[in-house]
Image (tube, coloured by chain):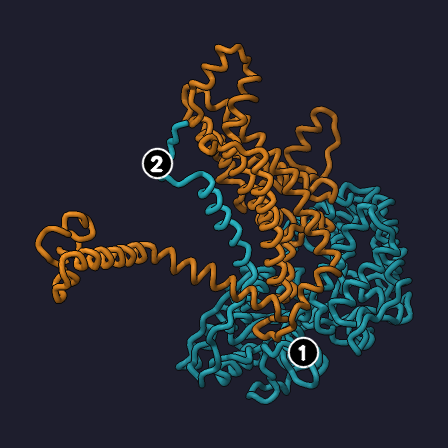
């Protein structure tokens, strides 16, 4: 047989070469970089990272410009990002010793980063903390040192589309007295009487909402010692409620719940007008109203007055942190100070990063808030007197709770496992992650 | 310089001619030795030329393949996370035996590979045979059928598939015409992996092109001889085409198995990076990514990367071992 292969390389060799090349590729996927980095003294160049939506990117850039106008000799390289991509990028840059100097942090990951020595203690580096609310400051501390300063506070609320409630001919409940049973009845009525689905069910896998449910029973997602703080019975009850709602047709069929979850906030049923209610944090209202094009009503999470204590709490929306490897500690500190305490910053930020943690600034800007932010601020003002003591800070490793709960939830709603096994699976996986 | 160039291009003429070049101008060691020395220096100069032409590739190989491989191997024995890590010995590898999600990821990847690869190769071979008939506008058809291979791994197509196979997507709308109530093809744990397999089969273009080239290499005299002996279409395919194509089938098989073990993009997009619903599309690569980039566990992620390499190496070795029994190299015997 005449070979028409001009290279003279046998097919067998060719196959082997191709295979080696292809096989070596996956190893690139999981490699870090040990090289360089380190802290020089004060070069005045700051990398500044945050996540958010377009409006936030725009006003944050204006804050940066205002800061630069006041501070000669400092240059800032801003890197806005979207939430999920932000954490991938941050993980890689910290692992590679190129961490940004000033960065936004989240409750889920703050302690992981602090525990790995990636963050600078912020107590004595020239940031004025005197006006920052004490309870907010505490949420950013680990072993008595502050690794993140809360930008502002949020609360969880049930967002309701009043037009759709009216269209279904269902009466608006009294959120000061309603129980979880009332809530179930409410969304079942909405689904059966109206065209839109009563609740899109994308929050039943949210560990913060479950934490509120547990707190209403005098329990908590985590103990102050960093273990699991809820009983199996409580979580079984939670899952059973979800299955009952599914069987009653109050929430979408499981496939649609999965789709709604991966569609993201802007494409979720509440924002597109195909769902009547959903649980969100108060600083998300504005963005959802904008997509929906009409006003929403905020209701308290059910069960606040029917349990042993109210479960709602104020959560720090996000934190400002400084990397331990910052190239200019003084400049980084003055930027964080500017973000937290200056009029210029808060005039632009308003309530977008939560109702400001700086109490003097909070009082100053509250009257000037735009309508959508005012909804959230008023809601927080109304519930604050009712609140019980906040939950303990989540332990290191708690960042994985959301993914674990989502996995358990998805398996369960398709009817593959029992309520009891779902609870067991969640507790086992989360215990392993937090080392409890 | 000119002398050197000449030396490289026409080495044979130099041994008898005038003695240019640095080697020959050395203290005269007699004609025999001069020739040998010149030859050696030419060889070394050629080696350097070859190396310098290869250098972009070599630097790339060392800096972005071998280097990270070594780093990753080292990291797999540490608890490296967010810039800090300590030596933990074989702990990451021991952990694999008690990780149910890893076991699930291996299962999902294996099902995906062993269902999608045979289907994809069958589709590729079938189309290659159809396209081998020398139709008018062959180049056009070939391009059309190759197109999915270019698109299949892309983010845009994966996002489009999420829509097409959604509960209210195109597929279900078509099914509704026939009165069939469709499912959420990518959001139901029982179907999501199947949808990804279809997406993979759809990208049959590159094995198809290789099959086409292989078909062209089969001398027509074999077919003519078979025809004279009275073989039908089917018999000619089984007795002539298939045996002579086995090296190509083998090549495609090995390459596609490796490829599908490494699949990442489609599952990442369709499940928003979480391997869902309910871990039903949690490929090994996705789990590796999840451990490294979401759970901050670079050490364990590195160990999983080496596990993936080991799995691929084992299947490739098995493939080569088994090839002795079914692959027919015409030039071998």
Classed neighbour count for the residue bearing mark 2: other residues with Cα under 10 Å, few (<14), some (14–19), many (≥20)? few
Nearest the eye: A52 or A286: A52
Task: Have a look at marks 2 and 1 and say if they share a chain.
Answer: yes
**Which quarter of the image is occupied by the C terminus of chain A?**
bottom right
Distance of label 2 from label 1 (alpha carbons): 67 Å
Q: Which percent across, then down, holds residue A354?
A: 65, 70
Residue shown at the point (20%, 52%) measured from the top left: B8
Residue A6, disc = 2
Circles 2 and 1 in contact, beta carbons < 8 Å: no
Q: Residue A201 carries which label?
A: none
Mark 1: few, some, or many residues within 10 Å (few <14, many ≥20)? many
Residue situated furthest left in the rendering: B18
SS class, disc 2: loop
Which quadrant holds residue A420?
bottom right
Q: Name the residue under label 1.
A: A140
Residue B118 found in image quarter: top right
Residue placed most toward the observer, A257 or A409: A409
Residue B123, horizontal then vertical, whole percent: 57, 30
Q: Residue at x 61, y 33 (%)?
A: B119
Q: Colour of chain A?
A: cyan
Q: What element carries label 1?
A: loop
Quarter of the image for the N terminus of chain A: give it. Answer: top left
Please state if A52 lies on the left or on the right of B219 as rendered: right
Horizontal and vertical percent position of residue B181: 75, 31
Q: Please tell me which residue lies in front, A59 or B131.
A: B131
Q: In the picture, which chain is orange?
A: B
Q: Residue at x 21, y 59 (%)?
A: B37
């Amino acid at each position: 047989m005449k070979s028409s292969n001009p290279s003279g390389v046998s097919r067998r060799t060719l196959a082997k070469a191709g295979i080696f090349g292809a096989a070596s590729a996956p190893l690139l996927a999981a490699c870090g970089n040990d090289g360089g980095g380190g802290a020089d003294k004060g070069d005045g160049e700051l990398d500044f990272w945050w996540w958010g939506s377009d409006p936030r990117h725009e006003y944050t850039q204006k804050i940066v410009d205002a800061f630069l106008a006041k501070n000669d000799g400092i240059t800032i390289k801003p890197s806005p990002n979207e939430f999920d991509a932000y954490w991938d990028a941050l993980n890689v840059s910290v692992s590679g010793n190129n961490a940004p100097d000033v960065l936004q942090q989240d409750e889920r990951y703050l302690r992981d980063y602090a525990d790995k020595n990636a963050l600078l203690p912020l107590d004595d580096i020239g940031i004025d903390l005197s006006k920052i609310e004490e309870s907010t400051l505490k949420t950013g501390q680990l072993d008595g040192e502050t690794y993140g300063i809360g930008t502002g506070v949020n609360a969880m609320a049930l967002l309701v589309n009043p037009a759709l409630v009216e269209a279904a001919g269902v009466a608006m409940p009294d959120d000061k007295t309603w129980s979880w049973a009332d809530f179930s009845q409410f969304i079942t009525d909405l689904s059966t009487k109206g065209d839109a689905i009563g609740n899109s069910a994308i929050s039943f896998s949210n560990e913060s909402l479950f934490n509120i449910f547990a707190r209403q029973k005098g329990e908590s997602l985590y103990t102050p010692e960093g273990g699991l703080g809820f009983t199996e019975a409580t979580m079984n009850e939670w899952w059973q409620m979800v299955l009952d709602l599914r069987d009653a047709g109050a929430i979408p069929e499981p496939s649609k719940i999965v789709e709604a979850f991966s569609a993201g906030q802007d494409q979720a049923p509440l924002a597109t007008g195909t769902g009547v209610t959903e649980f969100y944090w108060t600083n998300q209202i504005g963005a959802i109203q904008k997509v929906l094009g009409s006003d929403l009503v905020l209701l308290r999470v059910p069960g606040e007055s029917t349990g042993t204590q109210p479960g709602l709490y104020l959560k720090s929306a996000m934190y400002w942190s400084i990397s331990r490897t910052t190239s200019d500690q003084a400049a980084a500190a003055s930027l964080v100070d500017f973000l937290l305490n200056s009029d210029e910053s808060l005039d632009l930020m308003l309530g977008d990063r939560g109702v400001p943690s700086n109490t003097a600034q909070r009082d100053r800007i509250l009257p000037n808030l735009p309508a959508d932010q005012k909804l959230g601020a008023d809601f927080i003002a109304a519930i604050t007197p009712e609140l019980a003591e906040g939950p303990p800070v989540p332990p290191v490793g708690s960042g994985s709770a959301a993914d674990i709960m989502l996995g358990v939830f998805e398996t369960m709603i398709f009817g593959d496992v029992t309520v009891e096994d779902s609870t067991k699976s969640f507790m086992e996986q989360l215990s392993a992650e937090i080392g409890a | 310089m000119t002398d050197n160039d000449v030396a490289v291009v026409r080495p044979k003429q130099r041994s008898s001619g005038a003695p240019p070049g640095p080697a020959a101008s050395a203290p005269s060691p007699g004609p025999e030795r001069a020739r040998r020395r010149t030859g050696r220096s030419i060889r070394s100069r050629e080696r350097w030329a070859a190396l310098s032409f290869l250098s972009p590739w070599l630097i790339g190989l060392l800096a972005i393949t071998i280097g990270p491989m070594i780093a990753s191997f080292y990291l797999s024995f540490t608890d490296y996370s967010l810039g800090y890590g300590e030596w933990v010995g074989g702990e990451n590898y021991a952990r694999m035996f008690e990780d149910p999600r890893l076991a699930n990821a291996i299962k999902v990847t294996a099902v995906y590979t062993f269902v999608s690869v045979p289907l994809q190769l069958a589709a590729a071979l079938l189309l290659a045979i159809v396209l081998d008939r020398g139709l008018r506008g062959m180049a056009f058809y070939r391009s059309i059928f190759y197109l999915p291979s270019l698109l299949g791994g892309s983010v845009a197509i994966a996002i489009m598939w999420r829509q097409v196979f959604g509960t209210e997507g195109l597929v279900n709308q078509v099914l509704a015409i026939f009165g069939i109530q469709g499912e959420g093809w990518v959001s139901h744990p029982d179907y999501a992996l199947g949808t990804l397999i279809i997406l993979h089969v759809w990208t049959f273009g590159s094995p198809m092109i290789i099959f086409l080239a292989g078909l062209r290499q089969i001398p027509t005299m074999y077919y003519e001889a078979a025809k004279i002996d009275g073989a039908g279409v089917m018999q000619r395919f089984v007795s002539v085409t298939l045996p002579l194509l086995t090296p190509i089938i083998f090549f495609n098989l090995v390459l596609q198995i490796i490829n599908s073990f490494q699949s990442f993009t489609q599952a990442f997009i369709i499940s928003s990076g979480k391997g869902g619903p309910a871990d039903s599309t949690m490929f090994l690569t996705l789990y590796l990514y999840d451990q490294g980039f979401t759970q901050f566990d670079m050490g364990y992620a590195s160990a999983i990367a080496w596990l993936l390499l080991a799995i691929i190496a084992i299947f490739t070795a098995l493939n080569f071992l088994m090839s002795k029994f079914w692959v027919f190299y015409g030039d071998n015997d």
